[in-house]
Image (cartoon, rainbow, N blue to C red):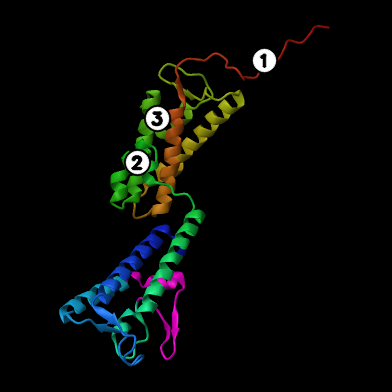
């Protein structure tokens, strides 16, 4: 992702620039600004009376460390100063010149530059948030999916995480219909079968939908989707080791999302153990034809 669109990274840079500015001000507290003495030849910041070399060195070290964390802000914010004889200058990485003979920067350049970057980063964060695509949070997946996947996922083993989640979704469906006698794909197809339930073979239906066509569409669609999850997600992982079928984070997360959606539909469905009376919204039987 481009740095200017990454909200987390922009926040990091903003904090880093703020920390740099604080460290620089601590350094300047040990100095006075040279406003008169050999301007352009003498340092722009001269050590203050009473400030020890050890204090100045420690403060300079803190500024340099902060500059290392914040230096990319100039590129992200496109903020540079052009100095005759020095070219294009990053005010963060060139901060130390204020205390050198023939300084290329003044303390005001550092302060103005960092203030500009902080303001620019605020605007970039607002833009990035406005343009950001929605995030799919792993811990927002169906509880049975994430509970099964979490340990392997956090260990970086995406293959095992998805495989464990698929097995747990199968167990979730088994509990819903009270069956453990057939494999997962067959279980999905039989659970959402068009046929009536039989002893030991409950069916899953969606009575909450108003029209019969929608109830049928949900039953058939969830059946095909769930069977596809096991055929195309679980089975390849079960039959091939992770070295042959490596999953990147995005591919694994998309598979977990599919399993999560199926698990939520299983939750939504009602287990039916005996034939149900016709519901409102079902198509009426054709009227008998009148005789001649």
Q: Report which quarter residue 92 is drawn in.
A: bottom left
Question: Quick check: is 84 in the magenta stretch?
Answer: yes
Q: Are marks 2 and 1 in contact (CB under 8 Å)?
A: no
Residue 236 to residue 167: above or below: below
Q: Residues within 10 Å of mark 3 (few under 14, many from 20)?
A: many
Q: Which residue is mark 2?
A: 146
- List x then y, in percent, for residue 162: 37, 45
Q: Secondary structure at mark 2?
A: helix
Residue 285 numbered mark, or none:
1
Q: CA distance from mark 2 to mark 3?
A: 16 Å
Q: Report which quarter residue 76 is drawn in.
A: bottom left
Q: Which residue is mark 3?
A: 173
Q: Secondary structure at mark 1?
A: loop
Residue 10 to residue 188: above or below: below
Instruction: Find the magenta span and give its range.
Output: 68-92
Question: Quick check: is 79 in the magenta stretch?
Answer: yes
Q: Residues within 10 Å of mark 2 (few under 14, many from 20)?
A: many
Q: CA distance from mark 3 to mark 1?
A: 34 Å
Residue 11 to residue 291: above or below: below
Q: Secondary structure at mark 3?
A: helix
- List x then y, in percent, for residue 26: 26, 72
């Amino acid at each position: 992702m481009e740095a200017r669109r990454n909200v987390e990274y922009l926040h990091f840079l903003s904090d880093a620039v703020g920390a740099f500015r604080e460290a620089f001000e601590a350094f300047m507290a040990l100095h006075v600004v040279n406003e008169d003495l050999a301007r352009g030849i003498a340092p722009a910041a001269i050590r203050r009376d009473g400030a020890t070399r050890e204090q100045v060195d420690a403060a300079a070290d803190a500024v340099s460390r902060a500059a290392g964390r914040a230096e990319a802000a100039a590129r992200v914010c496109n903020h540079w100063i052009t100095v005759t004889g020095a070219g294009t200058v990053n005010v963060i990485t060139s901060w130390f010149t204020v205390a050198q003979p023939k300084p290329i920067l003044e303390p005001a350049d550092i302060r103005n530059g960092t203030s500009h970057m902080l303001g620019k980063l605020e605007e970039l964060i607002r833009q990035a948030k406005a343009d950001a695509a929605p995030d799919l949070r792993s811990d927002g997946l169906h509880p049975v999916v994430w509970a099964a996947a979490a340990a392997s996922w956090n260990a970086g083993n995406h293959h095992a995480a998805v495989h464990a989640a698929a097995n747990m979704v199968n167990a979730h469906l088994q509990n819903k219909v009270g069956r453990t006698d057939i494999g997962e794909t067959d279980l999905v197809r039989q659970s959402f079968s068009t046929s009536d339930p039989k002893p030991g073979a409950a069916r899953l239906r969606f009575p909450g939908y108003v029209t019969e066509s929608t109830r049928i569409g949900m039953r058939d669609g969830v059946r095909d989707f769930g069977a596809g999850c096991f055929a195309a997600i679980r089975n390849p992982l079960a039959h091939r080791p992770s070295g042959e079928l490596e999953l990147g984070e995005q591919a694994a997360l998309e598979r977990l999302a599919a399993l999560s959606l199926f698990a939520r539909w299983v939750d939504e469905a009602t287990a039916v153990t005996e034939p149900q009376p016709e519901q409102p919204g079902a198509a009426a039987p054709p009227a008998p034809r009148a005789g001649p």
